[in-house]
Image: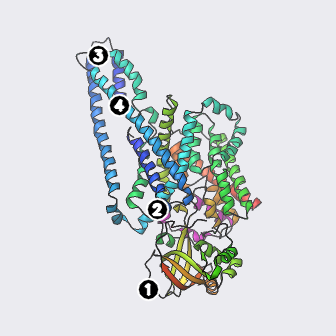
Amino acid sequence: MSSGGEVRAQASRSGEADATDATDATDDHTAGRVGSAEDAGFDVRSAATAIVWVNLAVVLLYRGNFGHILSSPVINNWATVFVSLTLQALPFLVMGVIVSAAISSLVPSTWLVRAIPKRTALAIPAAGVAGALLPGCECSSVPVAGRLVSRGVSPAAALTFLLSAPAINPVVVVATAVAFTGRPEMVVARFVASLLTAVIVGTIWSRFADADWMEQRLRQLVDRSHAHDFVETATSDFLQAGGFLVLGAALVATLQTVVPQSAVDTLGGDGIVAILALAVLAVVLSICSEADAFVAVGLTQFSMTSRLVFLVVGPMVDLKLIALQIGTFGRRFSLHFAPLTFVTAVVVGTIVGEVLL
Amino acid sequence: MRTMDRPLIVLAIGALALWTSLTDAILQYLRPSMRPWVVLAGAVLVAVGLASLVLARRAVREERALALVHAGGIDPVHPHDDDHHGLDDQVAPDCCNPSGGHEHGRVGRVGWVLLLPVIAAVLLDPGALGAYAVSRQSQLRLVSAGDFDLEQHLRAHSFGGQTPDLKLSQFTVAARNPDERELLSGTTVALTGFVVHEEGPPNSFLLARLQIGCCAGDAIAAIVDVRDYEGPTLDEETWVEVIGRYDQATTEVESKENGWYVSPILTFESLRQIDAPSEPYEYP
């Protein structure tokens, strides 16, 4: 549709410029023909999507006929994990998108710029601590951070927030304390290591990152009424971030279904191998930061330090999250950001673990 | 992505969230305490989707009206009403391209994949994780019992000679714990789970149940090895309540032989088949 509109607009703009020209009439005729051809194309394509929607509705209503054909333990296992990862992320994603849309359409950008310290050296730790204010998991913090950047917050500060929020907010702290009952040092270690990692990554990013690594893939605003903007921003942010989230969930579900978890069994124990094994497991499993402590507590064959690394890496780098970040900031961004965060999280987690645990 | 598709996709996934969370379907995927949040998310998505639908309809209508104006503009009878063109085209990029213009250029086709979970959930209706997930579990990922006092539980539930029931996760955690193991030894307990067949000694089967911290994606299996069962062969994934005694001695011998903790062994006493519980998982 857009191309049709643009063609028309350009054609008639040129028509306007040549208004006094005698050939104007023929120009206008050509433009008219291009426009109507495009309109016909639009009708055919929208008819096609309408058919898709109708088919989808029919298939869903007659689902009883398909379930048996397609059901097998492998497919069912995949579908259960896939749907559960999506549903579990949904409340947090919706919260993130709503907060993001509110920042975008309701908070004046001058206010944000004033609220955040000018000097990066102050803004980064402040953003890290501010992460404690967003009670959600990683799925909410990505759209919010994306929106902060588009509203003029420095990328390094927004990224620090993105990393710290899912690991140090009160909900996650409480969940960790419940899972590790009787071991409060784990809660402290997780908080300290996560905040440190976030601040270090933010600082490195502010010094060394190229500005063009980060794309803005979230929709930019056209000024209209607040309510209109809010709905439009929420819809497109949700589709963009949610689409990538679902892709990530599909990947995780496939890995979980195809690769037996007993693949980790050869790796247990102490030392650097255990740390790396659990760091990779955290990336692959993509467990929500509110639940990962319950998984970590069951990894009894691994050292406490390696379990801490699992809890520090998980909310910052995992497959689902990388997909979300690609959807928000682009591929070049993730190519730099994910490895940097992974290495920092492993190193900081190991050091903090050795000191505190 | 087209004007009307965006709100429809949002509505579809919102409807999925509401449908699963308002029925027990959600218990196949998430822990029960997540339910209100999914209801809320579904309600917000449906509201946003409806609002977006209204805006999209308005945009489409304005677009049609504008197309009519354009059609009028090329009327050979009035070839010179260019003033109208100028006005309309200034308005056009803002109000008439909600789907494809500059402002949404970045929202690509990726939004369509949000229909996949809807299709997977409704079409396949996969049910809770079962024997397949148990068979692929890691030996190193163990369930946790949360805040659980075995001694107090046994005392409170053996009142009047009744058999105390334990969650499978509580039982397996206690069986690995040197202090609680002694307490458990020789006690008759009732355990609920589903049947899994793996290679093992004759007259045995595995009784298993999955524990989830948040969603089925983080499920860990609690497994008990039931021995001395002489009844008819049970189908895999049959739900049963088994009464039996923890066989500490055999468990320890086999653990030494294998070099790791084997699943705790339960000497079979009795069993009854039950319906699959509405909450298929255990929660720490």
Stretch of the chain drawn in magenta: A256-282
Task: Establish whether labels 4 and 1 are both on one chain.
Answer: yes
**Would you place residue A253 above or below residue A49 in this image?**
below
Task: Establish whether labels 2 and 4 are both on one chain.
Answer: no
Mark number displayed over residue B232: 1
Q: Is residue A211 visible?
A: no
Q: How far separated are the C-alphas under marks 3 and 1?
A: 91 Å
Q: How far separated are the C-alphas under marks 3 and 2?
A: 63 Å
Q: Residue at x 67, y 56 (%)?
A: A174
Q: Nearer the viewer, residue A134 or A41?
A: A134
Magenta span dominant secondary structure: helix
Report the residue marked by disc 4.
Answer: B61
**Would you place residue A148 above or below residue B194 in this image?**
above
Q: Residue at x 24, y 20 (%)?
A: B75
Task: Establish whether labels 3 and 2 are both on one chain.
Answer: yes
Q: How far separated are the C-alphas under marks 3 and 4?
A: 30 Å
Mark number displayed over residue A24: 3
Residue at the extreme front of the image, as rendered? B160
Chain identity of mark 1: B
Report the residue marked by disc 2.
Answer: A80
Q: Residue at x 57, y 38 (%)?
A: A147
Q: Is residue A106 visible?
A: yes
User: Callout 2: few (<14), some (14-19), or many (20+) C-alpha neighbours within 10 Å?
Assistant: many
